[in-house]
Image (cartoon, helix red, strand yellow):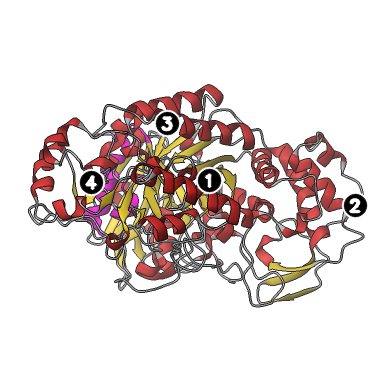
Amino acid sequence: MNTKLHNHPSEQQAMVLEDMSPLARISSFIRSRISENTTLLWLPAVWNTCGYADILEMKQGEILVAAYPFLDAHLEQLGRDAHRYHLEEATNLDESVIYSSLVRYSTAWDTDHDGNIESGTFLKMILLLPLLKQMGVNILYMLPVTRYSTINLKGDIGSPYAVQSMFELDPNLHDPLLDDMTSITLNDEMSALVAACHLLDIKVTVDFIPRVTARNSDLIRNHPEWVYWIHNEALEGFAPPPIPELDFFEECKPDKLETVYRSGETAAFLAKFSLPPNDLNEELWLQLKHRSQETGEELLHLIEEEMGITTAPAHSDWINDVQPIWTDITFLRLYADNNPLVEHLIKPDQAPYVLFDTIKCNYYPAEKPNRELWDLLIEGLRFNLNTYGIDGFRIDIGHVLPVPLLDEMFDVVKSIKPKALLISEDLFNRNHQKAAAVGYNIMLGSGWNIMTDITKDNLTEYLRELPQLAIHVFACAETADTPRITSRGGVALARMIAVFNGFLPNAIPYITTGFEMNEELPLNCGLGDNTDGADIPRAFFNRMQIDWSKSESMIPLLSELHEFKSLKRNLMDAEKFFVAESPEHVVVYGYMDEEERLICCFNLCGEQAVELSLAPLQHVDAAWKVGIDSHFGQGQLSSAALSANKVKLQPYQAIIFTC
């Protein structure tokens, strides 16, 4: 499409962007810069979703464009496209697709070809929205966008989960193209992205982090007692104590407490903790606090140098877990006292500490809530909803929060946004009823774990439990916390699994940013790690970009899945779901009623083809039709094969049939 550039908003765009909202003001500013600014950008060609024609140069999947005319054309197209959609208050989760984005990574690019990757921004994220719509996305889930700590870095830029302030955004997400727009704030840029999503009927959820904070969190300045402290000499090699009496990756339930606290290394671990600096030496604490304010020196570094203590790194709440400790974050102290169940197991003068049980305030609440901290966390939720207009939250490790706190949080969210999307990080489908009872409507679930080892037994067991779930789960083989599925079996496996996850009952297809471009490098490997400890770049900690310039991507397949599924909505009911008998290495599931059948077939073997008879699944004398084939135009069935009711599935091939 040859996009014409205009000096004034089109009539359609003006109808959509008629007020002086942040999105309208940004759009107006960009238009005002068209004639007077000559800024050029190299961008991925795939981002050119509006068919902008005035391309100055093109090579290897990139285009060189004049920045402001290019953005203006896309914002104008956004205004036109908006008339095709209507934002409903409630989200139909059976018709949803979730896209998980780390904004600084999702739209990162070397836009000036100086060899350095520029951070992704809220503004550039708007360019991706049409691509997301092609893939059926109606929920954008953004990993943390708040200002994060730049000390105790893991990698070269640090983790977005090391939240330093829950009320300030990451300044790197500001777009330099808006530098001269003095009337705009970073909050406005975020609000503009949310508004753009809403124009296309995309709901927006963000990560909210209520259980941990950066080790040099802004909270420490006024409330050092809200986090946990250890002696400096305990920092090197700091880790939770091994409990040899218990199994690997065991949950700390009440019947395990005695064993944990009586185990050999637990006492030495507890001795590493210290009182907070204001209790340790209030006069010195006040002096250091004042000095930091006057000189700009890092307060935590002053405490370490002058008082010999530092904040305690966080660790897993699972006993004998192999995950490394999180050196850039520390737990928030949600109670001022200890759970009564452990009082007889610790010394009377024990400093505030973190152990497997104290992390899990859902199982082990104490009796003195840190009310001021609870109120601040609740205010953080209110701030996000009111400031940015978002539609919900994923509550980071929310399953370990005190139930009364979680209840209060959800009450506030629903008072502002009654149909809010609330996502639980719970890792196992077996906890679906608990998550639903608390108030969540989506949970991570077991898919990521099941698909670390893609076997027939694993997948069929997973399939059979899905229709009974009380809550929707993510349908995915990878998340931001796991290795990429391509690193387990290549692109063919990833394409097969994309089809597998596209048609499940009570499960929402979930696209981890980069999956659509067949990325192999992960955002993180905290779960299901297959790297054997290799020091590979990870987008949580390193400056990285998705290779948007690839000639082959998953976008056409994901778009086909969405379009095909939209034609089969009435058939795809959990009550019509079944798992069929199938040969070795093959999984078959589907839906049937009196009128129609949809059969999903998967060859889990990456080395050999498998023949499958469709005769037992046929509906009277209706002919089979191929709906989706995961291969790159390969493995198309001949009419003879179809008439014989047999199909040969190639390695890692998925085919959807209807009749």
Q: Which-is-in-front pick, marks 2 and 1?
A: 1
Disc 3 to disc 1, C-alpha distance: 15 Å
Residue 238, percent from left and from top? 27, 60
- Res. 20 in view: yes
Q: Is residue 638 magenta?
A: no
Amino acid type, residue under disc 2 in the picture: His
- Res. 249 in view: no
Disc 3 to disc 2, C-alpha distance: 51 Å
Write down the residue under mark 4: 356
Write down the residue under mark 3: 374
Disc with the residue nearer the chain's start (2 vs 1):
2
Q: From the image, which quarter does the C terminus lie in?
A: top left
Amino acid type, residue under disc 1 in the picture: Ser
Within 10 Å of the Cα at label 3, are there few (<14), some (14-19), or many (20+) other Cα atoms?
A: some
Q: Secondary structure at mark 4?
A: helix
Disc 2 to disc 1, C-alpha distance: 41 Å
